[in-house]
Amino acid sequence: MNKKIDVYLAGPRGFCAGVERAILMVEKAIKKYGKPVYVRHEIVHNKFVVDNLKNNGAIFIEELNEIKDKKRPVIFSAHGVPKSVPDEAKKLNLLFFDATCPLVSKIHREVENFEKQNLPVVLIGHRNHPEVIGTIGQTKRKIHLVEKVEDVKKLPFDYESKIAYVTQTTLSIDDTKEIISAIKSRFKNVEEPKKNDICYATTNRQEAVKQIAKKCDFFLVIGSQNSSNSLRLVEVAKNYGAKKSLLIEKIKEVDNIFFNNAKSIGITASASAPEILVKNLIEKLSNDFNLNITETSYEKEDIHFKIPQKLEKAI
């Protein structure tokens, strides 16, 4: 008889509205314009999703000069792009669609607004992440990147200076609060975004993990190594009481995990990981264990973002 293990499924989990929109845009473009459709950078940071789209006719590139057939459409990834990218696309006379998540576009507009006010802008985020590169590329002025609390001390402004900050959408809620607190302690006049820049999906998935982490001997996060929100979920699970917290990119990776002494497993999926991977993981675990599954719910999500009308009308 198989060993009994309690499984706690974090909810919400998996695809967010921005990811769903971006993937749908690629699918609709292939349907309307045929194969291939070019995509600048991984549309979302998930290998399963990217491989599926490749199989259906998407070609992934990093720069527009890699496009061999300039008559084919190109889609920009959900992470956002510097202003120079659509400018280049126009010069090349490309048909392009921007799948930037609307919540990332909101941050781009905030940067533009702070620039109009002539305010120095601090960006809380991870160096070299595509979203950060895209946000920095919204202005010709220098944006000051802060990755950790220690970086706040290095900012080249005095206490009386009026500054503004924005954040990457997929950061750790707790770490970001700490950095913002350090900024407000260091500077007298700090202009904040009108709404929290960390997106609803990042917040909800982290809070859902916090609710169940302490119950879990193992916490499995389905996601990718290059996905910021995946890595943050692994950290959150560990910080909030899970004995072991692991990132799972391919379901077969669980073959290398020894659950011998485990009585409970927590499972979530990053905002760029599809629910089918959760189902596949549960199915694989059920081959070896008698699973007692509890579905948890932190917050119900009912957010959807529209795709461009030109793609909406895809045949």
Image (cartoon, rainbow, N blue to C red):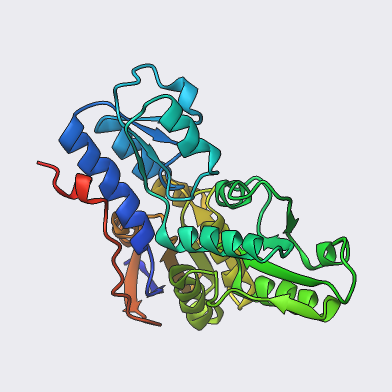
Query: Is the residue 304 above or below the residue 296 in the image?
Result: above
Q: Is residue 211 left or right of residue 97?
A: right
Residue 73 in view, yes or no: yes
Name the residue rendered at 41%, 56% in the picture: 101
Which sits in the foreground, 46 or 179? 179
Q: Quadrant of the C terminus?
A: top left
Q: Tell how many labels.
A: 0
- What percent of the width, then of the height, locates residue 122? 72, 62
Query: Is the residue 300 above or below the residue 73 in the image?
Result: below
Which sits in the foreground, 291 or 111? 111
- What percent of the width, then of the height, locates residue 242? 58, 73
- What percent of the width, then of the height, locates residue 75? 36, 38
Please, which residue is most extreme toward the left here? Answer: 315
Name the residue rendered at 73%, 77% in the picture: 190
Which sits in the foreground, 192 or 4? 192
The image quadrant of residue 171 is bottom right
Residue 243 in view, yes or no: no
Q: Is residue 219 left or right of residue 142?
A: left
- What percent of the width, then of the height, locates residue 161? 83, 72
Name the residue rendered at 46%, 74% in the picture: 264
Q: Quadrant of the N terminus?
A: bottom left
Name the residue rendered at 42%, 24% in the picture: 92
